[in-house]
Image: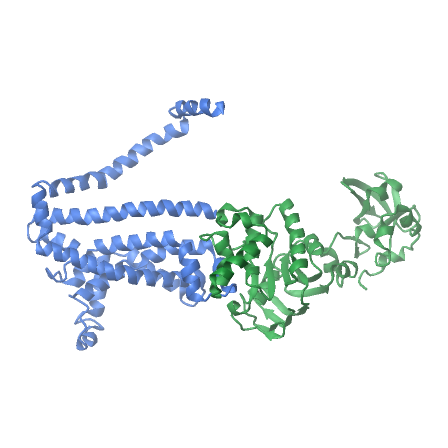
Amino acid sequence: MSISLEKVTKRFGVTFGVEDVTTLIPSGSLTAILGPSGAGKSTLLRLIGGLVTPDAGRILIDDDDVTFLDPRHRNIGFCFQNYAPFRHMTVAKNVAYGLKVRHRPRAEIADRVAEMLELVRLSDFASRYPAQLSGGEMQRMALARALAIAPRVLLLDEPFGALDAQVRAELRTWIKELHDRIHVTTVLVTHDQNEAMEVADSLIVLNEGRVEQAGSPTDLYDHPASEFVLQFLGPSTTIDGVALRPHDLVIVPTGEGTPATVTEISTLGFEIRIAILLGSGETAWIQQSRAEFDAQPVTIGQSIGITRRDATVSPVGTRLDPRGAADRAPDSAAALTQPTTP
Amino acid sequence: MTDTVTIVPAARRNRARDPHRRQLLPLRAAALLYVALLVGIPVCFLFGKAFSAGLGTFWNQITQPGAVSALELSAKVAAIVVPVNTIVGVGAGMLLARRQFVGKRLLDLTFDVPIAISPIIIGLSLFLAYSKIGAFGPWLFARGVMLVFSVPGVVLATMAVSLPYVLRSIVPVLIEIGESQEQAARTLGAGMWRRLFTITLPAIRWALLYGIAVTLARSLGEFGAVLVVSGNRAGLTQTLPVYIYSAWDQNFNDVGAFSGAVVLAAISISVLIVLSILRARERRLRVDIA
């Protein structure tokens, strides 16, 4: 089921509102609403879920105008940031809640609950209470509860927010797999761009309540519509006032490209970060793979030239090849001043 | 395993010398003495006096028609006041904890008035509003409604005095648990009443029971406001506390007063015990939430 927002505005004081949002979330997609805190991400999700009513604009779920429809009649699955478990009910009762509300026959409820618990791998936890679950388990219970009613759309508010790194990573993969299996249109809110890029097949980047850009993760990463999107969606550094990706910078012999001095080299596992000082007094940094660095090592204090490789043309494979990068090295310094926005 | 065996007695041995505990000893002694002098010992005297002429006399005193009707009236009043104030308290509590509206702070403050001011002031205020010479009295009287010097008056006064307790005990818990469970139920299709009965009330049940118990204790024990509004009509508008006061002050029936007091105290202490159990359970619940 597709979700369409038309000129949706909701204001609350200074932050968290959304302003004139028009966007289409395609049917069956896994869309991430991404943005810094206070950008209005959760508000947008709550607007779709009906927990908040817009000041202006229309919201359509699959061509039904739901703008003023009570959330209880929207047939949506909503997972809250704190999971909102019903603490006085067992896991099974939590999952059964929406079905009981719908007065389904008892046997059908039992079957559906069993099926859902199987899906979220909580079958052995059916008679436990939420207080006896870990964060990840509680999140899965909340998902089962939301999915039990066969919702038209699944809305997840910061689904990985309160979990530790390893559980986050697991749950991320799992949600992606789940989505591949059940194909329900899913919208999730996150402030973590890596998470969004990994999980989602489409992104909506929000900033100060407005949509900065929407599209596929690769598209947004490679063709950011604004400096904000560029900076938000990945590492960035600024050369001569132009923001670009630090892995798009290539070291060339002195005399070529923009002159710079290496000030610091740090190793972060597979990644090498080279901090540089430009002739203008600005600082910037270059991101390289270990192999790239080893093929053309530099030392602190060394004078180098830097230039920008054309990110949009260079395929990922050649980027990791240091000789490939070197071949491309004699880019003119003018390349640096090219705006990154197409 | 052997560790635990050796550690436990050592811990016990060290306890007497633990400076943190030693420092608290005088404070503990002072607190106990204070409570004993103020409440414990006087109540013991009361029980002693009530039974001083024997169990038979005690039984005679509490089965006198005046005492029985007073106890009955107190029970009846509580039976009306407690449910009404529970419903009002839950409704107002939801309003205060979940909604923003004009006049919210005023409503919040008004609910605290019965806690802050003396019950006798409530009684006098009700008198001024609803007695025959009061503001609404003549209008009500013309329609056959007598709210002062009558059982409805006693109910009214008790209701006013015990109004805040359910509200005050549930609002902090409502705020603490937040709205998300109710919202989740709503997205799952539950209507307002279903959300209230299947999500909200179970979530706040211990605090609610605590509030109900305090309301009950307050309704049974209310004296000042009831005295003013009831007109103290023996056998008609005398609640148990008013009966005790009259026995002692006007009828010079000390043993009667003390016997009645013991009955009232016994009921209140039972409520207190139930309360302390509920409180402990609620505290455990809060630990769960945290």
Colour pattern: by chain
In the rendered image, the vertical position of residue B80 relative to residue A248, given as above or below: below
| Residue for point 6% across, 53% down | B251
Can you say which quadrant of the picture contains the N terminus of chain A?
Answer: bottom right
In the rendered image, the vertical position of residue B267 relative to residue B187, given as above or below: above
The mark tally for this picture is 0
| Residue for point 47% across, 48% down | B289
Of residue A273 and residue A239, the one placed in the foreground of this image is: A273
Instruction: Write down the quadrant of residue A334 in the picture.
Output: bottom right
In this rendering, position of residue B117 left or right of residue A193: left
Can you say which quadrant of the picture contains the C terminus of chain A?
Answer: bottom right
Of residue A39 and residue B127, the one placed in the foreground of this image is: A39
| Residue for point 40% across, 67% down | B103
Q: Colour of chain B?
A: blue
Q: Colour of chain A?
A: green
Query: Does residue A288 appear in the picture of this structure?
Result: yes
Q: Residue at the far front: name it.
A: A107
Query: Does residue A296 appear in the picture of this structure?
Result: no
Instruction: Write down the quadrant of residue A33 in the picture.
Output: bottom right
The spot of residue B109 in percent (x, y) is 36, 60
In this rendering, position of residue A230 left or right of residue A331: left
The spot of residue B113 in percent (x, y) is 31, 59
Of residue A148 and residue A206, the one placed in the foreground of this image is: A148
